[in-house]
Structures are given as structure tokens and as C-alpha cells.
Amino acid sequence: MNEPRHPLMKAVGAAALAVLLAATGVDAEEGRVSHGLSLFDSLKYPAEFEHFEYVNPVAPKGGTVRLSSIGSFDTLNPFTLKGRPAAGARLVYDQLLAPAADEPSSEYGLLAESVEVPEDKSWVAFTLRAEARWHDGKPVTPEDVIFSLEVLKTKGQPFFRFYYANVEKAEKTGPRTVKFSFSGSGNRELPLIVGQLMILPKHYWEGRDFEKTTLEPPLGSGPYKIGEVDPGRSFTIERVEDYWARDLPVNRGRYNFGTVRWEYYRDDTVAFEAFKTHGYDFIRENNSKRWATGYDFPALKKGYAVKEAIGHESPTGMQGFVFNTRRAKFASPKVREALNYAFDFEWSNKNLFYGIYSRSRSYFSNSELATRGLPEGAELALLEPFRDKLPPEVFSEEYIPPATDGSGKNRKNLRTAKNLLEEAGWKVIDKKLTHQDTGEVMEIEFLLISPAFERVVGPLTKNLERLGVEAQVRLVDTAQYQNRVNEFDFDVVVNSWGQSLSPGNEQRDFWSTDAADRQGSRNYAGIKDPVVDALIDKIIYAPDRTSLVAATRALDRVLLWGHYVIPNWHTREFRVAYWNQFGRPEISSKYQLSFFDTWWIDPTKSGPSAQTKGEKAPAP
């Protein structure tokens, strides 16, 4: 169950598992009424809970935290495909239910005080809190909830149409009650998916064009409202002091920063130089070289700044070089498999990544959902009906990415690649890899947004050139990159698909035939495979945890042997650095970093910054 998000921003959540729990009263004729929902056996927190365990309920409020973002922005509406939304713009809105960051696939009442679900999971109903208010003081109503579903499905990003595809209608059933009816029964994730719905104010959007970009601060009901906006350069949100939900159990101890300001920088290198001179306060580091060698500036040595690796238990999903199979040159799985042999991960990990990564071997890495060994039992039973439509390796071999000894001498793998390419009809003619029937020369452009990835792709392109491929790297700005990815105008991009412990409906947006040609979907590879479509449905409608694991492993295996990506790498730590001015709870959430909503500014840690010593931060 993945929460909707911008492709460049962090992912959220996943899908279907075991049993939706009702922890409170029961309506014998219709559904079970509860303070929350879970896809597992039970909710961790009872109806009378006071706060989540991973927060400090008496954390001090206030102060300003400064963050960074790369590129620019031109809209404050984060729900549409058009424009580049400002970072943090969603924090002005509330959802019906709030997820727990220490409990997989569980949600508790936020805008909704209770939720009702029948045994067959064919609908879900929410009763709104009487005290729920928009920032203009007007109550949040069932009409707002119905409007939100309709406008997101018809005018929002394509993701919403997939995510809420099986939500057939929403109707008002009482003064504060809304019922969502589904197109079928048995989809255990749908009630939680509806619980994630961001609620938008109908009265505000009436008379406004929802699909247009806008820099007019929109109306919300959440913990923050939009403050100062400097188009394309900086964006600020301010804590709502009289926030209606500040004392609810799901919010106590959260959203502690008084003001949050994002400064926009031209690129990642400039942004990091600004961090070193305290141009902003917190960074999540994804550059392994910089993590190993770049944090030697004076303020860190003196303790004014902190570098820390924080362990987590979250599945790491898949990151990889993604082939756009809409391009004829990548249509053959054999070609895609061959190009996998050109990537020397072991050499890269040793010489570029300082040995800190593990190679990804699954789309559901670091979880029980990942494939292992050969298919057997329930997984094999799911795959068997499709045997004649699948590569024989699905049944006979465990998927293991090509490996080397790390010496940089990749000749054996390149010979294997050459043989596979010849089997697929490609042969080197005049030092160029050429298709023997069409005469097409193999040209591959790697479309990048981060300069840091150039040093990673460089050795790969060198190996490709040894195979006769004309390979090049194209580095573009954020806006151009996003437009080209939305329109599937690329050969190869670097992408990651975040996963959780309970995948489900979002898998349609990742891999389904329906998503392949819909602009803005996350089926970047362009997969159109009826077997994949069938296995996605098996995941979504899995009746129990055992069935879900089997279906997910089957899908994982089919995707891996489709060779849609060159798998990259992962780590099970959040690598962060921050200026030593924060406090955080003693207990960390298992599955999220939770910096933004559980840390606070500690007035006892106000050490001097580099700027007080006459140093100047680079301009954004």
C-alpha cells in the first residue's frame, strides 16, 4: 500500500495482507466499527491510546528548520500532473486516517473518528469528527470527502485513477458519514487506501481550475499552512497554532517545527556546499562517495554538525537502470538480459561506493516477499498455469544478477553479452552493434537528473561501447527530466520503486498493461504482460498473508526474468547529517525516518554555526 507521491519525492506504503480488524463496537447488520484499520491480525494501539510510541508527547514546539530541494517549482497544487509542485505542499492537508510508522499497514482515525467495514470488504464508511475544521474555520463535511475522490480521479495525476480505480462511488449517508462502495468484494486493501485519501475543500475549489498550476496558497485543514512563497527559489510552511487535530492521539508529539523553509538549489553539489556552511539544517545523504569522503568540514569535527547512520526495518524495493521497452531495440528480453552483463557492480561497489551497498536481487528486497530458491508450493501453483508463456528459467533457475570478481576485467561477462545479442539478431559491423535485419545501430541514451550518477553510468557506457553500442549520458534539469519521464521519452533512466511489507493496488501503476501507455504512470519500463496483470490481481485479492507472500514472490520472479531493469543496490540505513540543534524520541519508528514529524528543535543544542565565523553559504 503506497501513499501517492511525486516521483522525485519519497514513496509511501503498500497493499493487501491478512484481516481487517475491528477493535471496538460491532454493527451486527452491516459492518464492524473501529478506531482504525489493519491488514494484519490486530491493531497495536487500542481505542484509548494516547500517542504513538515513537514520539515524544511533550516535545517542545516552535523554531525554524531549513531544508533543501533541487531545481525549481511552479505550483502549490501537488495533486496534478501539470507543473512542478513545491516540496512539502501536501502538509497543509489531512487524511481520513493516519498511518502508524511502527506498525505495517495500519491506520488510525484522523479526520474520521471511526471507520466501518463489512466482512466481504465491499465498502467502507467513515464518520467524520465534529471538530474537524478547515483553516478558514469552516467544518470538514461529507461533501468535501466526496469531492476529493471525484476530483482526484478525474483531474489528478494518473496514479490516483489507478489507486482508486475500484472505488465505484462515494455517497453521504449521514450528517458526518460517507460511504465508499467498491466495484467488487474481497479487496482487503481498499478500505485502507480510501483511508489515505487527502481531503480537499470543495468550497475553495469551486470556481477554480483544479488542473492549472497555481502559486495561490490553497486552503487546507492540516498541521501547516503555506507561508512565504518566492517562486522557484524558496517555499515556507508555518505551523497552525490552533490546528484542530493537534491533541489527537495520532498527532500528539508530532509536527513540532514552527516554520519549515525549503531553499532551492541549482544542483546537488551546490546544495551540499550550502549545507556545510549551515545554509540549511538537515540532509539525507544518497551519495556514497560524499558519505565516505565529503564530511570532513570543520563544523562537523567540532560537533556543531552530526553525521549518523540510522538503521531501519523497511523493505528496500528495487532501484535500477530501467529499459523503456516501448523502444523496439529493447523489445527482446534477450537484449535486455545481454545489457545486464555490461554492468560491473562489484567493481563499482569497491571503487565508487566504498563497499557500503548490497546488490539488489528482488523488487521486494529485504523482506519475506522476495524470491528465494526455486518456486514451490503455493507460488509454483500460481505460476504453473502460465508455464508456456514464461521463460523456462522462471521454473528452473534462481535469479542472480551477473557478477564479477571486482577487478574491472569484465571480459567473460561481455562475451556472454555478445553471444546473447547475436542470438537476438544483433551483430557488430564496422565496430557498431547493428541489427542484422533492419540495419539499426544500437544507440542508448541514459537520461539523468543527478550529476552524481554520471560517475556510475560512465563505466557502464564504456563496457557497452566494447559491445559496439553507441552509449551517451544526457544530464537535464528537473523540469525537462520530469516531462520526459512523464511522456516516456527516454531510452534508460534510473528509477526506484519503493515497497512495503504489504504490496497491493499500487502494483497496477508500477507494472500493469493499463498503466503502460498512460502518461505519468510509474510503469516506466512499459510492461505489457497478461501474466503480470494476473499476478497483480492475485496480490490485490489475496485472502490471507500466506497467499499474499506466494503471489508477490511469483510476481517478483516474473519481473526479474523479464530483465526490465539492470538491478542497482540498496542499504538498510538512513544516512543523515544535521546541524546539532535537534532532539528526537528515544524510540525510533521501524519503517520511516520520521525526521519531519517527530524531531524537534532543542534550545539547549544551539551551537555556533559556520556563518558566525564569517563563512558564507553558496547562493541557491
Image: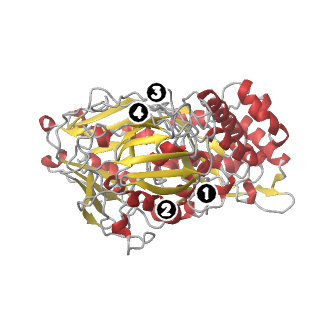
- Numbered disc 4: secondary structure: loop
Farthest right residue in view = 437
Residue that mark 3 sits on: 42
Q: Badge 1 is on which residue?
A: 472
Q: Secondary structure at mark 1?
A: strand
Query: Label 3 sits on what residue type?
Result: Ser
Between disc 3 and disc 4, whose residue precedes?
4
- Give above or below for 564 relative to 155: above
At 39% from the left and 63% from the top, the residue drawn is 77
Q: Position of residue 212 (x, y in %)?
A: 43, 72
Figure check: 546 above or below 517: above
* Quarter of the figure with the C terminus: bottom left
From the viewer's perspective, is 443 left or right of 604?
A: right
Mark 1 packing: few (<14 Cα in 10 Å), some, or many (20+)?
some
Q: What distance separates the C-alpha of mark 4 from that of mark 1? A: 62 Å
Helix, strand or loop at mark 3: loop
Counting residues from the N terminus, which is met first, the one under dot 4 or under dot 1?
Answer: 4
